Image: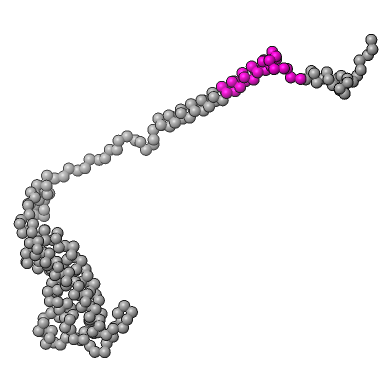
């Protein structure tokens, strides 16, 4: 029998073909392939179970730690606070003369009289406008002071005795004698004393008009003349009667 050729017709040696034949994988559907698939599936299931168990154990330890911390009593929680009892007050306070002072809760509330109720209504009606006029009158007087110091001639003694109102700036704003040749700075411009007085009189006329409107409002709402005069005195506006 003739010997076998060491090399087949495809160019491969027979030893290489044998080695490659031994290392080839098992064909699909063979018993060996099914065994390998089952082993891989079992390994995957076991790995997933191990990971799930480890995660469950970690969550369980975390819950136990939170519950233990909640059960731990805070060092600041030391039961209900207890304060010492206050000393008992005497039944009635006594003045220096030894007479008891009645408790404020025992004094009955006296209803306002008719005149008091009328006054309260007058104040509620006129408080805001009169308060505003009083504030603007004070501002006007502050503007009048430097004008008077520079421009108004000192009143003579007979004139001061005749009027009896030394310093009545509203009463003398329009009639005071001015010094000649004096100029003032007014909002960046130079004006003489007559021009400065005209500016002050214009502002005073606006306030007097507002005050007259307040008087008409008071009369229309039943405020009596004596109440109006009392309101003028309360807000220091009596000088407008002489303007």
User: Which of the pair 10/118 is nearer the observer?
Assistant: 10
Magenta span main SS: helix
Q: Is residue 26 left or right of residue 55?
A: right
Residue at (21, 76) in percent of width and height: 202
Please tell me which residue is depicted at 91% across the width and 15% down the height of the picture.
4
Residue occupying the point 18% across, 80% down: 173
Q: Is residue 27 left or right of residue 88?
A: right
Q: Position of residue 83 (x, y in %)?
A: 26, 40
From the image, which quarter does the C terminus lie in?
bottom left
Q: Does the rendering let one see residue 78?
A: yes
**Residue drawn at (68%, 15%), measured in percent from left and top?**
29
- Regarding residue 141, the answer to whether it shows in the image is no
Residue 41, image x, y percentages = 62, 19
Q: Quadrant of residue 132?
A: bottom left
Q: Is residue 38 magenta?
A: yes
Residue 73: x %, y % from top left: 39, 33
Left or right for 130, reference 51:
left
Residue reaching furthest left? 114
Image quarter where the N terminus lies is top right
* Residue 115 % position (x, y): 5, 59
Q: In the displayed structure, would residue 185 be above or below residue 108?
A: below
Q: List the single residue furthest toward the right.
A: 2
Q: Does the magenta run of residues contain 54?
A: no
What segment carries the magenta color? 24-49
* Above or below, 62 relative to 15: below
Location of residue 85 by image quarter: top left
Rendered position, 107 above or below 34 = below
Please name whichever residue, 6 or 116, is drawn nearer the observer in this view of the structure. 6
Q: Nearer the viewer, residue 36 or 107?
A: 36
| Residue extending furthest toward the front | 9
């Amino acid at each position: 029998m003739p010997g076998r050729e060491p090399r087949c017709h495809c160019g491969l040696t027979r030893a290489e073909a044998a080695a490659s034949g031994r290392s080839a994988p098992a064909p699909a559907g063979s018993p060996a392939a099914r065994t390998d698939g089952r082993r891989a599936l079992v390994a995957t299931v076991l790995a997933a179970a191990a990971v799930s168990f480890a995660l469950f154990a970690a969550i369980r330890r975390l819950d136990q730690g939170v519950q233990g911390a909640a059960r731990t009593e805070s060092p600041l929680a030391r039961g209900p606070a207890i304060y010492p009892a206050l000393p008992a007050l005497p039944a009635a306070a006594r003045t220096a003369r030894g007479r008891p002072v009645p408790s404020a809760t025992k004094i009955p509330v006296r209803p306002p009289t008719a005149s008091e109720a009328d006054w309260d209504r007058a104040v509620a009606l006129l408080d805001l406008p009169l308060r505003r006029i009083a504030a603007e009158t004070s501002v006007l007087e502050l503007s009048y002071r430097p004008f008077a110091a520079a421009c108004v001639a000192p009143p003579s003694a007979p004139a001061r005795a005749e009027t009896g109102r030394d310093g009545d700036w509203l009463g003398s704003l329009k009639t005071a004698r001015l010094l000649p040749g004096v100029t003032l700075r007014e909002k960046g411009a130079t004006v003489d004393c007559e021009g400065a007085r005209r500016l002050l009189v214009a502002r005073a006329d606006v306030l007097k008009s507002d005050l007259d409107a307040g008087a008409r409002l008071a009369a229309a709402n039943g405020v009596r003349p004596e109440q109006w005069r009392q309101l003028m005195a309360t807000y220091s506006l009596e000088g407008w009667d002489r303007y």
